[in-house]
Structure formats: structure tokens, C-alpha cells
Amino acid sequence: MWLSLVGKDVVVELKNDLSICGTLHSVDQYLNIKLTDISVTDPEKYPHMLSVKNCFIRGSVVRYVQLPADEVDTQLLQDAARKEAMQQKQ
Amino acid sequence: MVLLKSVPPPTEGVRHEQAETTAIMDGKGLGCGTLYVAETRLSWFDGSGMGFSLEYPSIGLHAISRDLSAYPQEHLYVMVNAKLSDENEAEMAENVHDDDEDASSGGEDDDDDEEGVITEIRFVPSDKAALESMFSAMCECQALHPDPEDDDSDNDFEGEEYDVEEAVPEHGQGDVPTFYTYEEGLSALTQEGQATLERLEGMLAQSVAQQYHMAGVRTDESNAEFEDGMEVDAGTTVAGQFEDADVDH
């Protein structure tokens, strides 16, 4: 599911209220996220960080990831999530 | 304040070592020293042997900053989910909340919840070309320290909680459909299955001829093992099948 999102622009909101916009470079099994081409979304929520190129975000600090609605096939996402949930149970 | 301890630098599992690296913690310069990106923790020590260590689970984010207009030097930015105090290392994130003076993120300290306490550290190497490998080494080490997730882990395929009852759609049986041998099947029969078996056996008993004793031995009598109880006219079958085989030369 995540693999289809690589290359898309996402906004990652962290649990400490920081929001970072960038291009999803990669995701690993722990949902650690690598973003490239970071930019500011919400200056108030944006850390003193400044504009970085590459950023690695630990999975445990991510509150959620905002996906651009038009770039994501929600039906596909639902199906994939359902499949994963069923696979989990086996 | 700033945590500086006299702890020996890590000797094992050092993925990357970067000398001549200045450390700035929450805007306070700590001087020039050596950064050790080890598999166990991230450490930095200055020339006199004083330094600090960070546990990877406490590092929320790290990044390479190349924008000189925002900060005058290219550096490795590290955001730690904790406030570093004198006694504690970065693990003790929950406790420390009394720091007002550390303007880590501008005006953000007001609406602090337990997650909002962070420390920003910048590592400025004299060799800017090393930033990529410093970044990569940290990424690798982060992957070595995943968080234990207690709930809703979609990466876990252990699945002991598989509820068979709700997974099987109304078959009346709690078992994954499979084929049983006769012996196994007998013991695994449900009540319904048992009733079915008795019924079929009754049908078999009725349709079988006297000579049918041993399974597998094909007598002239009909093979009565068909479940639908269809009777086969043995005579016709035998004669019909081998009609052309009995031609006398």
C-alpha cells in the first residue's frame, strides 16, 4: 500500500505538533519515513528546522500522514487495507 | 541545561565517526568534538572527553540542512523527543517539563503536551561532504531500534488471535475446510457430520450386495461406494467394457 505512495507529496504531522511537507522517498516496515525536498506547511507548527533536503522521520513520532486526495485511489486503499487485515488474522 | 558527562566513547559498532564536528544544543554551542554514530547510541565528545549520548528511540527526526539562509552552515539536524537535563539522558522524556528558558521552537512551548518537549541538536562537521554518510549512518541505526508496538501492529503476522468462528462464513463448522482421512475424519465430525455419516452408511448397507466385504476388492457386484447411492449394473458394465478385448484370434 505504501509503495504506491512513494513519490507523492505528503504532509507528515508528528506527535509533537510539527508538520512537515515533502515528497515521500521511502517507508520501511516500522513506518519510518524518508522525505525529500522538505518545505514548510504551517510555519507555526514548523520547527526551527529550516528547509532541509533529506529528512528521516522515526515511525514512532508520526501522528499521521496526510495524503493528497486526488493522488490516492481510496478504493484501492480500502481493498488493500482489508486484505492486510485479513492476512494479519491468519 | 546541557548534559555533559565523562563517558568513554563507543568502541563497537561505530557506523560512522566524524571528527571536527561542532555540536549545538538548543542554540547553545558545545564546542568542537567528534560525533560517533554507533549502533547502540549516538554520541558526541569534545576535545576534553566530555560529551553526551542519545538513544535512537528518542530521536524523532534527523535531516541534512543545506539552506544557508536559514542557518549559516550546512549541518545535520537532530530532533530529540526529550529535554536533556543534568541527570538524565534523552530517554527521560516524560519527566522534564519545567524548562521555559529553552526556546527550542519559538513560541511553541506554551501548548505543550507530553509529546511537545523536544531538543534540537545541530552537528556541524567541518567536512560538509560527510553529511550524507552521517545521515545514512543514522538512518541505518534508527532501523536497528524499532519501537515495540503493543497494539494494532499491521506489520505483525503472528495472528494468534485469528477467530475461526467469525472468519468462516456460516458453514456450521468451525474448521478450515480440508480433507480428512477416514480415521481423522471420524473423530472430527460434528453432530451434523455424524448424522450424515450414519445416513450414508445406512444407504450403503442397503445397496450393497452380499459379496461386498472388503473394500478395494472389485467383485462382480456393484461398487457401492458412490455417495449418491447410484446402483451400477455390474453385469452390463463388465461385459460392455471389455467387449473388444475378448476377441479370439
Image (cartoon, coloured by chain):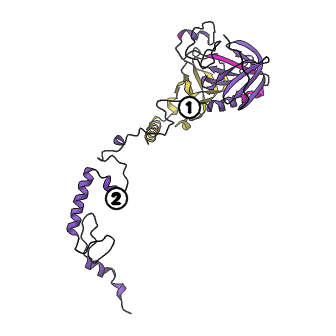
Chain colours: A yellow, B purple
The percent coordinates of residue B42 (x first, y second) are 68, 25
- Residue B25: quadrant of the picture: top right
Which structural element holds mark 1?
Answer: loop
Q: Chain of mark 1?
A: A
Camera-nearest residue between B188 and A15: B188
Label at residue B183: 2
Whether callout 1 and callout 2 share a subunit is answered: no
The percent coordinates of residue B74 (x first, y second) are 74, 21
Given the image, on which type of amino acid does mark 2 rest?
Glu
* Relative to A10, residue B109 above or below: above
Given the image, on which type of amino acid does mark 1 rest?
Leu
User: From this viewpoint, is residue B69 visible?
Assistant: no
Which range is magenta?
B111-134
Q: Could you tell whether B9 is left or right of B91 in the image?
A: right
Q: Chain of mark 2?
A: B
User: From this viewpoint, is residue B144 visible?
Assistant: yes
The percent coordinates of residue B172 (x first, y second) are 29, 47
Which structural element holds mark 2?
Answer: helix
The percent coordinates of residue B9 (x first, y second) are 73, 24
Q: Could you tell whether B189 is left or right of B67 in the image?
A: left
* Relative to B1, residue A65 above or below: below
Q: Could you tell whether B21 is left or right of B83 in the image?
A: right
Identity of the residue drawn at 56% across and 14% down: B95
Q: Is residue B127 magenta?
A: yes
Q: Give the labeled residue for mark 1.
A: A31
* Relative to B55, residue B28 above or below: above
Contact flag, marks 1 and 2 (Cβ < 8 Å):
no
